[in-house]
Amino acid sequence: MAELPLESLIEATLFSSGKSMSVEELSTALGYDEDEMLDCLGSLQATLKRRKGGALQLAEVGDRWALEVKPTIAEHLPRETKTDMPPKLLKAAALIAYHQPMPQSRLVELLGQKAYDYVRELAQHGMIDRRKDGNTRRLATTRRFSEAFGCPHTERKKVKAWFREQVQSSGLLDELGDRKEILREESDGTGTVQSSLPVQEVATSSVDEEE
């Protein structure tokens, strides 16, 4: 039997695993050195991008790689093809909605390395957008997110303010740990950084932001 090209093995491995994998994990699983694996990942990424009519793309998420549905395709998938969102993704989605546009690195600080997989899955559900921003990505909610959570808004600032109200009333993020740390603001992307706010002031700040 002819030996399969490494690109094909990588594609099949990532597809069947259903999760992101690091270069080291792929190298160990397939028996190739990491430099060769990294070269082939770049080559496979380009191949999938050129593939006419292809629905999948190879995404680099942090230091991990994953096959995922292209965002332009995910937006048009019927709801029936979507599975119910697992609780683990609800927490990640809530944090993104609360802090959007949220640096992916900040989500990793709060949820650990699994956050990379959560981001990938949320993107595949069509719930979030990921935009490259230096060495990280900025995460924000989509129209599908608003539909899934029953939010009456689609504009980012209004979704953010609405979701903050939900978090305050439901305690959705309480079990993640230090509430003040979780709700602490990062840079808003305009060069200013908001200091940590007492919990009772968060709702007021969200109203100010919307105005």
Image (cartoon, helix red, strand yellow):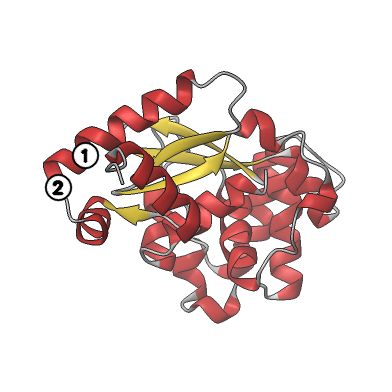
Give how far apart the Cα atoms at labels 2 and 1 are.
6 Å
User: Residue 139 versus residue 164: which sits nearer the camera?
Assistant: 139
Residue 26 lies left or right of residue 169; in this view the side is: left
* Pick the front one: 44 or 60: 44
- Provide the secondary structure element on which disc 2 rests: helix
Kind of residue at badge 2:
Glu
Q: Is 9 in front, or is 182?
A: 9
Q: Circle 1 — which element?
A: helix
Q: Look at the picture and state if 184 lies above or below 23.
A: below
**Which numbered dot is residue 209?**
none
Q: Is residue 172 left or right of residue 190?
A: right
In the rendered image, which quarter is residue 31 located in? bottom left
Task: Estimate the x, y position of residue 150 in percent, counting from the top left.
Answer: 86, 54
Identify the residue under disc 2. Answer: 34
Residue 182 place in picture, x, y as percent: 49, 66
Q: Residue 195: in sight, yes or no? A: no
Image-based side of 142 in relation to 112, left or right: right
**Is 166 located above or below residue 34 in the figure?**
below
Q: Is residue 121 above or below residue 54?
A: below
Quadrant of image for the C terminus: top right
Callout 2–callout 1 Cβ contact below 8 Å: yes
Disc marking residue 38: 1
Q: Answer yes or no: is residue 172 visible.
A: yes
- Choose top left, top right, bottom left or bottom right for residue 24: bottom left
The x and y percentages for residue 57 are: 49, 34
Identify the residue at horizontal 30%, vertical 28% (top origin): 43
Total labels drawn: 2
41 to the left or right of 34: right
